[in-house]
Amino acid sequence: MPLLELPSMESKPKQLHLFMFLLLLTNCLSSSAITLESSFPQQALPTKSGYLTVNSTTNSSIFYTFYEAQKPRTTLFETPILIWLQGGPGCSSMLGNFYELGPFRVSFSLRHNVEHLTLERNPGSWNHVFGLLFLDNPIGTGFSIASSPDEIPRNQHDVARHLFTATRKFVALDRLFENRPIYLTGESYAGKYVPAFGYYTLKKNEGLPKSRRLNLAGVAIGNGLTDPETQVGTHALSAYYSGLINEKQREKLEMLQKEAIRLTRSGNWSEATSARSRVLRTLTNMTGLATLYDFRRLKPYEDELVAKFLSNVEIKRALKARESISFDVCSDLVGKALHEDVMKSARYMVEFLVKNTKVLLYQGQCDLRDGVVSTEAWMKKMKWDRIGKFLEAERNVWRVNGELAGYMQKWENLSHVVVVNAGHLVPTDQAVNSQAMIEDWVLEKGLFATGLVKQKPSNIDSRR
């Protein structure tokens, strides 16, 4: 399959006008109208988008959208590129694009009993000073194409192999991309994708000439499922000390957790995954919460808005996505393919990465699935000769624009951030603060600057 590219909108004013006309016409005929802003923002369309082939024989391909930096601090040849991977397994990175950290977000309103979906500028977009690449991963997810269900990866090695191939092809699209630093980022099940991709890249780079390597500069994982055996054992205590369950309920939940751990240690991967699901389902029933992804919410995250938005054929066409694909935020087929992978640990890959590049682990304070407690539990087990120093490092108060944003702890290559007033989808809940975090981490500013790690707790402010 040839690589597809969405041309710069500056060079295509006629196509833009045609796009708007067809979009409005389609909406008039639709039972559920999608209304875009009166003048479609050029920045809302990707700089490039289309497909990156990972198997030239079968044409299985990863769909991508790329947004160039809005206000780069250096020449584009030197401007870092962030790659965003969604979790799931099997959830589309278009959720991250249009609901979390892309330049524009989908918002909803109801007028005269008609649904209106509007694109609104995201003040906390991660492509403010960096290039931002969204990959629908693995194949079969979102707009990505799997030639057959059998070709969907069943393990992290194959996931990483596809991602490496796709990213190499993306870098080859434009000489502006050739040597730019690449940072791998993602959340939730990308707590496995990101370290697997990073690990594979560093190992693969060793056998490649410099011109064919990926310039990996760091990895960032938000609210990640990385070491499931350890993490599944934390839910009962976390909920108990949050006042959400009583002692009797805690004991019941701990029994279910122990069963999930036992099955994991015995290598019964399918049953272990199902046992973890029982833990989470029981916790949901005990607490009555609308979602474990954010215990403050009275209703779940509205990710269905993205599905409705991307069901429009004109929007698919504008993004250079295959129009025949029926878009789902999360693919049951991909989830089924990776069912036995869920409880397998990727911690050893993080341990390798932290010895060779910088690593950021961040969590929203209010996430009960893959939150602070579950992450800190496996971090303490890391086989890294600096982990003791990290655990002894001071935890700093982190502020953005003079307001409390969270807490940060750092030692050498490892940084840990807790984002207050945020759940599982940190960029959705704290757009500006998440932008400040990722920019300061990449650029090594503020609390991430070298030399601040040994200071006493401080109220350092990340000025925008």
Image (cartoon, helix red, strand yellow):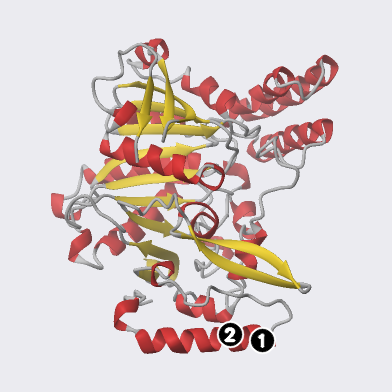
Q: Which residue is mark 1?
A: 28
Badge 1 marks a residue whose secondary structure is helix
Given residues 428 and 114, the one toward you in this image is 114
Q: Please say if the residues under marks 1 and 2 sit with CB atoms less than 8 Å apart.
A: yes
Disc assigned to residue 284:
none
Q: Quadrant of residue 262?
A: top right
Tell me the quadrant of the picture where the C terminus can be found. Answer: top left
At which x and y percent is residue 356?
A: 27, 31
User: Which residue is depicted at the point 49% across and 66% down?
Assistant: 144
Amino acid under label 1?
Cys
Amino acid under label 2?
Leu
Crowding at mark 1 (Cα within 10 Å: few <14, some 14-19, many 20+): few
Given residues 76 and 377, the one toward you in this image is 76
User: Which residue is depicted at the point 46% across and 51% down?
Assistant: 85
Q: Which residue is mark 2?
A: 24
Residue 416 falls left or right of residue 228: left
Q: Is residue 229 visible?
A: yes
Q: Give the farthest residue toward the front.
A: 402
At which x and y percent is residue 33?
A: 67, 77
At which x and y percent is residue 298?
A: 75, 43
Given residues 182 and 201, the one toward you in this image is 182
Q: Give the farthest residue toward the left.
A: 210
Cα separation between marks 1 and 2: 6 Å
